[in-house]
Image: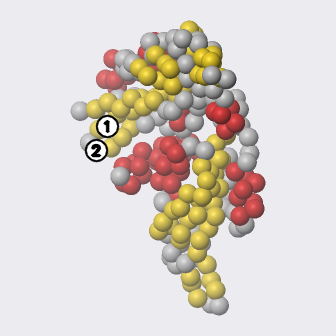
């Protein structure tokens, strides 16, 4: 599974590093916790167990706001090389506290997901556009969805998409989703959320994904990521 995640994360990692918003390693727990409480994105903190040669042997999650992003981040960090640490002239293993922050436009923070949220009970799979499927082009779409007090999808707006056809396919599928409505003070209420949908392909035991990680981190309030993976054979 680890090798599969490493293949999956390469493009995501390049996009993240190019964006230049990853936090660098911090030497103190206080600094890490400060980074973790930024708003407008997903924060996570890891303890990296680094051997004497600077390779990451093991990763422990201290805190995270997204399990899926944590998987991608850990696969990235397993590829990272750190400078050797000297103690009394000897190279020693070390534990590095390492925060990461994925900035997300329009994200309202973890508190937004504490509001009443509808629960999906029927999710129709998007129909992958033929020309994108033939070209094995991965992608994603971000949607804003309104659900009424009866659990019906009343409106779907496309926020952005990697390809226009993926955006259209995702929106048409979500319009057919059914929900258990959000409940406030014991009564069903209208609600809204963001949904990220990814389209990827399995080809020769490798997974092709879109190089942007934004589909994996929809602005909150948000429901769990919906992933569509197709065989490229």
Occupied quadrant, residue 34: bottom right
Q: Which mark is residue 202?
A: 1
Residue plotted at (59% across, 13% down): 149
Is 178 in front, or is 126? Answer: 178
Label 1, residues with CA under 10 Å away: few <14, some 14-19, many ≥20: some
Farthest top residue in view = 154
Around disc 2, counting alpha carbons within 10 Å, would you say few (fewer than 14), some (14 to 19), or many (20 or more)? few
Residue 205 badge: 2
40 displayed left or right of 165: right
User: Residue 141: x percent and y percent?
Assistant: 51, 24
Question: Secondary structure beneath disc 1?
Answer: strand
Q: Residue lying farthest left?
A: 233
Q: What residue is at 51 percent from the left and 75 percent from the top?
A: 51
Q: Is residue 218 left or right of residue 174?
A: right
The answer to whether mark 1 and mark 2 are in CB contact below 8 A is yes
Q: 60 or 15, which lies in front?
A: 60
Quarter of the image where one finds residue 33: bottom right
Alpha-carbon span between mark 1 and mark 2? 6 Å
Q: Nearer the viewer, residue 183 or 15?
A: 183
């Amino acid at each position: 599974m680890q090798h599969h995640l490493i293949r999956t994360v390469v493009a995501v990692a390049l996009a993240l590093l190019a964006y230049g918003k990853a936090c660098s390693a911090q030497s103190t727990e206080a600094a890490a916790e400060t980074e973790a409480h930024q708003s407008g994105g997903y924060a996570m903190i890891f303890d990296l167990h680094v051997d004497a040669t600077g390779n990451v042997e093991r990763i422990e999650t201290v805190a995270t706001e997204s399990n899926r992003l944590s998987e991608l981040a850990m696969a990235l960090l397993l590829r990272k090389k750190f400078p050797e640490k000297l103690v009394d002239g000897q190279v020693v293993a070390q534990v590095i506290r390492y925060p990461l922050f994925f900035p997300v436009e329009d994200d309202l923070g973890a508190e937004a997901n504490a509001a009443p949220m509808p629960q999906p009970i029927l999710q129709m799979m998007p129909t992958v556009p033929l020309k994108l499927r033939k070209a094995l082009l991965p992608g994603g779409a971000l949607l804003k969805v309104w659900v009424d007090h009866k659990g019906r999808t009343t409106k779907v707006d496309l926020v952005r998409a990697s390809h226009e056809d993926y955006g259209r396919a995702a929106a048409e599928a979500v319009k057919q989703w059914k929900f258990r409505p959000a409940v406030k003070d014991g009564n069903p209420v209208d609600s809204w959320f963001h949904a990220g949908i990814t389209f990827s392909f399995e080809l020769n035991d490798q997974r092709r994904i879109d190089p942007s990680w934004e589909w994996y981190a929809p602005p909150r309030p948000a429901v769990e990521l919906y992933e569509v993976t197709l065989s490229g054979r």
